[in-house]
Amino acid sequence: MKIAVFGTGYVGCVTAACLARDGHQVIGVDIDTFKVAQINSGESPVEEPGLGKLIEQAVAAGRLKATTNAREAVAATELALVTVGTPSNGDGSVSTQAVLRVTESIGEALRDLQKPYGVVIRSTLLPGVLEEQVIPRLMATIEPGFPGEEYPETVWVANNPEFLRETTAIRDYDEPPFILVGADEPWQAETVFRLYERVKAPRFATDTRTAALVKYACNAFHAVKVAFANEIGALARELGADGHVVMDLLCRDTKLNISPAYLRPGFAFGGSCLPKDLRALVRCAELHAVRLPMLSAVLPSNEEHLERAVRLIRERGVRRIGMAGLSFKAGTDDLRESPQVTLAEILVGKGYDLRIWDPHVQVTRLRGQNRAYIDRHLPHLAALLVETPEQLLEHAELLVLATGVADQLDLDGFHGPVLDLRVDLCRPPRRAAAGSPV
């Protein structure tokens, strides 16, 4: 393919060099004349292991060159990759100025050329920026007065987040965890995937907002992992334990720790272990004068997620609520620190007419701390429980699905609204297309 790469920093240079190495015709575009001259002389304008040799070979083979002329680059190519930086503003928000300037330069070229063209954003942008700023700016530049409601038929826009780390960028390009494209149409995603025919990695296509957030979620998770390890390490030192050994052994558990376990957005966590032990760990740190800001924020974060559920229920504007699932997870009668118990307690306190169905919970069989917990939080539980799914559905104006017991319900005859706490707290009302293997 014939590709223009706008921006010749770390991401742009690595992307351009690897694409040229793999047989594509690539033009790097930058306003920095020194960078352009370096590339055209076969040198790398950035320091990255192995990059200088790739650029030298690509330029010598005639598959890579650079220019400051955006119109020239667009005229000679069928696709643009935008790789310019998106640094932080003073208030922490993302600066989109470089992306928008590049977008305008591409639009100005296309206004004169009137050719089919694809614009693919590799720069890191929050969900909504592409749809609400970049695309309208591009289309208004191509067609002045453009209202932003429909694209010119010959131009399409997608995003393709990068997952490159400095010092290992070429290896990361060749061995990514996956290739992700956000696009409106399958053929657009397929066009982007053609860039990476020689890269062996899973391919996923989704909508542009989801693709954008995946990039931020990955980086946030990496930051969380570093902060978590550092906080455990700081506490370990104070308590006389070896933090490196603790984390090494933690990582040996690939069933629950280093795995997809628990990494599914849904409702708040609860049960007899997680809240109690997290609370104890944070309190222990306080007594030893060790600050754990991240771990200290976990329980408040969990409570906020529960409040989101309360707000969604309140927004439905009905009073008769049916809830499927009360124990902290399906298959047990353990009610201790169950978020469903807390939710039920809040709803009853706010005057909702609540009924609950959980086939594993029977008041007469609750014993010990389990019984004591429910007596403190839902002393009138027996009056809230119903014996059959039919009784729950008959009562409910709004059905709240809380745990896996909800899968046993036959909802074909239920015509009221359904709030599934396992998924609806994490998806927009109109669900975007889920990522799927291509």
Image (tube, grey):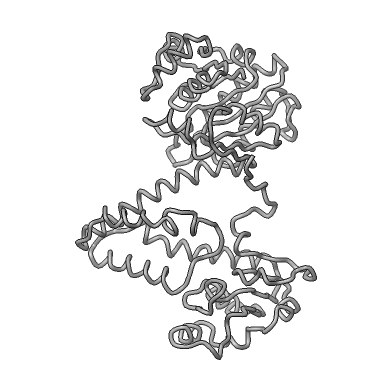
In percent of width and height, residue 344 lies at 58, 76
| In this rendering, position of residue 253 left or right of residue 347 | left
In percent of width and height, residue 43 lies at 40, 13
Of residues 104 and 116, the one drawn nearer to the viewer in this rendering: 116
Q: Is residue 311 above or below residue 54?
A: below
Q: Is residue 262 above or below residue 385?
A: above
In percent of width and height, residue 162 lies at 51, 34
Q: Quadrant of residue 285?
A: bottom left
Q: Is residue 247 above or below residue 277?
A: above
In percent of width and height, residue 75 lies at 64, 13
Q: Quadrant of residue 361?
A: bottom right
- Residue beneath the point at 66% across and 65% down: 419
- Residue beneath the point at 39% across and 72% down: 276
- Residue beneath the point at 66% across and 68% down: 407
- Residue beneath the point at 41% across and 57% down: 257
Of residues 69 and 364, the one drawn nearer to the viewer in this rendering: 364
Of residues 436 and 309, the one drawn nearer to the viewer in this rendering: 436
Task: Count all numbered tags in the image, as a single digit.
Answer: 0
| In this rendering, position of residue 431 left or right of residue 51 | right
| In this rendering, position of residue 436 left or right of residue 85 | right
Q: Where, quadrant-wise, is the N terminus in this rendering? A: top right
Q: Where, quadrant-wise, is the C terminus in this rendering? A: top right
Furthest-left residue in view?
A: 240
Q: Is residue 21 above or below residue 342?
A: above
